[in-house]
Amino acid sequence: MTDTKILVLGHPTDAHVAHMQSALEQAGAQVRCLETHHFPTQLRFSWQADTQQGQIAWEDGEVWMLQEIHRIFWRQITGVAIPDLEDKQQQWIAYNDAMSLLRSLIQAQPSQWVNTWEAYQFHKEKPLQLSAVKQLGVHIPKTLVSNDPQQITAFVDTLDQVIFKPVYGGAHAQLVSPDHLDPQRLQLALRLSPATFQAYIPGTNIRTYVIGDAVFSAEIRSPSVDFREDQAAELIPVDLPAAIHTQSLAIATALKLKWTAIDWRLTPAQNYTFLEANPSPMFIYFEQQTGHPITSTLVHLLLEPS
């Protein structure tokens, strides 16, 4: 056991949290899980703004100084948990106070984080993410983000097939059908939220993991519009063309991601179209099916000197 301290952000019952904790411990690191939902009822955070000294105290009495933590692996953040109060104004104040301290601690030493708060905030603005990638010279689908029925209908009419999905995420992509464009249905849906509409790109899915300077890719063979719906999807390791390999590294850098999974669509003409870059992707199944050393490469990234 070394004195290298690694935090894994997430709940210990999460499969990827448990997997990374085990792999890091096998590599000799001291590891603890940080479940932010336990703050402030169980976890104790402290921060001195003038000295930039801080600490985390767990319910079992163990204390880690923030400056002693080598890296923090961001798997999942669940916010904070404030007990129900009769005074909702006081509960709102308490929630904002707890979140303010949590956000401050997360942003205090960005070099510790894989990935950083800034990278995650950028990921939430997916239309902006697409625009940033386009500026690198990477091909992206024709895309409209809107809650204007006229704009959406006109956009769909210019394309053979269109998919739609949430702007922020949280649901799978679907093909737009005539039923979706029923004026009354469209009006009702768009009064609730905008949506992302994209040209459907015929072809196959390619997933590329970028971890530091390492790049691993596989073709995902699935008939589904969104391969995440297909538990029988087949993963075939592939080597990217040199130009797409270079673009993958450039995308990670532009989006401030130390590690990411990039989803591409490969057309029958062998053209790559960027779909999304995820700052906290699942990878265990991908690694098992392809043999790509995702875990060991992540461990190396987390343990390398600052």
Image (cartoon, rainbow, N blue to C red):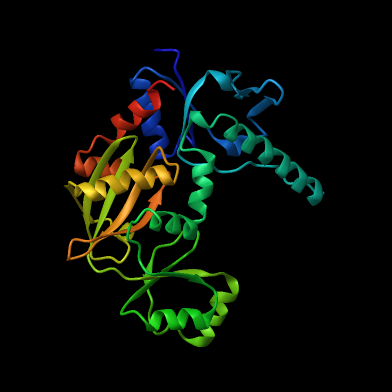
Q: In this view, does 209 lie to the left or right of 166?
A: left
Relative to 175, residue 260 above or below? above
Relative to 68, residue 172 above or below? below
Question: Residue at 31% of width from left, 47% of height from top?
Answer: 248
Q: Is residue 262 visible?
A: yes
Q: Which of 182 and 261 is in front in this view?
A: 261
**Quadrant showing the N terminus:** top left
**x%, y% of residue 131?**
44, 59
Question: For the view shown, which residue lies furthest in the bottom direction?
Answer: 183
Question: Residue at 31% of width from left, 43% of height from top?
Answer: 209
Number of marks present in the image shown = 0
**x%, y% of residue 289?**
21, 44
**x%, y% of residue 191?**
60, 75
Q: In which quarter of the image is residue 291?
A: top left
Q: In this view, does 127 lie to the left or right of 101?
A: left
Question: Residue at 33% of width from left, 37% of height from top?
Answer: 211
**x%, y% of residue 227?**
30, 59
Q: Which of 203 and 283 is in front in this view?
A: 203
**Quadrant showing the C terminus:** top left
Question: Residue at 23% of width from left, 49% of height from top?
Answer: 243
Q: In which quarter of the image is residue 266?
A: bottom left
Q: Is residue 282 visible?
A: no
Q: Nearer the viewer, residue 32 or 264?
A: 264
Relative to 26, residue 276 above or below? below
